[in-house]
Amino acid sequence: PVLLRLRRDPVRVGAACVVALLVLLALFGPWIVPSDPYQSSMLNRLKGIGTPGYPLGSDELGRDMLSRLMVGARLSLFMGITPVLCAFVIGAAIGILAGYAGGVTNTVIMRTIDVFYAFPSVLLAIALSGTLGAGVLNSLISLTVVFIPQIARVAEAVTTQVRGRDYVEAARASGANPFTIVRVHVLGN
């Protein structure tokens, strides 16, 4: 059913092809580049699109833009996906802990999360990047920290709802430990 719906919408098919091409370039780009993406040549600077040997032109240092695009896709995908995955794991853990524990623990954790909501996301990311310094790892950390509050808030709300359900109370009454209840009943629902 999903493939049938996907085939009916040409915009989705086009977007899926672009994403698939980007992933393939990220995976195989360094081995199939037409030229060295780091080699500069002042004689070949600012070549136009379609110039022989430079299908996407060249930059101000004479480097092939197609080769640079193919090699740069890996870092772009890494920096786009990794912070979201890390924030999902950390934010979900924080939210589930707060939602399941309830009481004072929930209040302390969620008020701390609310502090991060006081700042606009872009401003917080820039401030964290400026504080931590330049580099891919520091950018990764700052982007992860920016995404955590939203995910933690959703995980806490869902966990608080599930915590009071009958099947969770039954598991608790049967002697299941909190880790098992969270792993089986809360995460499963």
Image: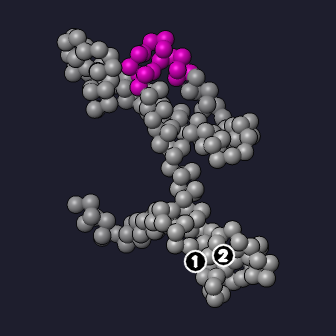
* Depicted 112 relative to depicted 79: above or below: above
Q: How is the image coloured?
A: one colour
108 to the left or right of 186: right
Q: Mark 2 falls on what kind of element?
A: loop
Residue at the spot 63% in from the left edge and 43% down from the top edge: 137
Q: Mark 1 falls on what kind of element?
A: loop
Is residue 43 in view?
yes
Counting from the top left corner in percent of width and height, residue 153 is at: 48, 31
Q: Residues within 10 Å of mark 2 (few under 14, many from 20)?
A: many
Quadrant for residue 65, please give it.
Answer: bottom right
- The quadrant of the picture occupied by the N terminus is bottom left
Residue at the spot 54% in from the left edge and 43% down from the top edge: 83
Quadrant for residue 178, please give it.
Answer: top left
Q: Residues within 10 Å of mark 1 (few under 14, many from 20)?
A: some
Residue at the spot 65% in from the left edge and 87% down from the top edge: 51
Quadrant for residue 99, please give it.
Answer: top left
Q: Which residue is mark 1?
A: 34
- The quadrant of the picture occupied by the C terminus is top left
What's the magenta region?
A: 96-111
Residue at the spot 56% in from the left edge and 21% down from the top edge: 111
* Depicted 138 relative to depicted 164: above or below: below
For badge 1, the amino acid type reads: Pro
Q: Which residue is mark 2?
A: 64
- The residue mark sitting in front, 2 or 1, is 1
The reply to whether discs 2 and 1 touch (Cβ–Cβ < 8 Å) is yes
Marks 2 and 1, how far apart at CA:
9 Å
Residue situated furthest bottom in the rendering: 52
* Depicted 53 relative to depicted 96: above or below: below
For badge 2, the amino acid type reads: Asp
Majority SS type along the magenta span: helix
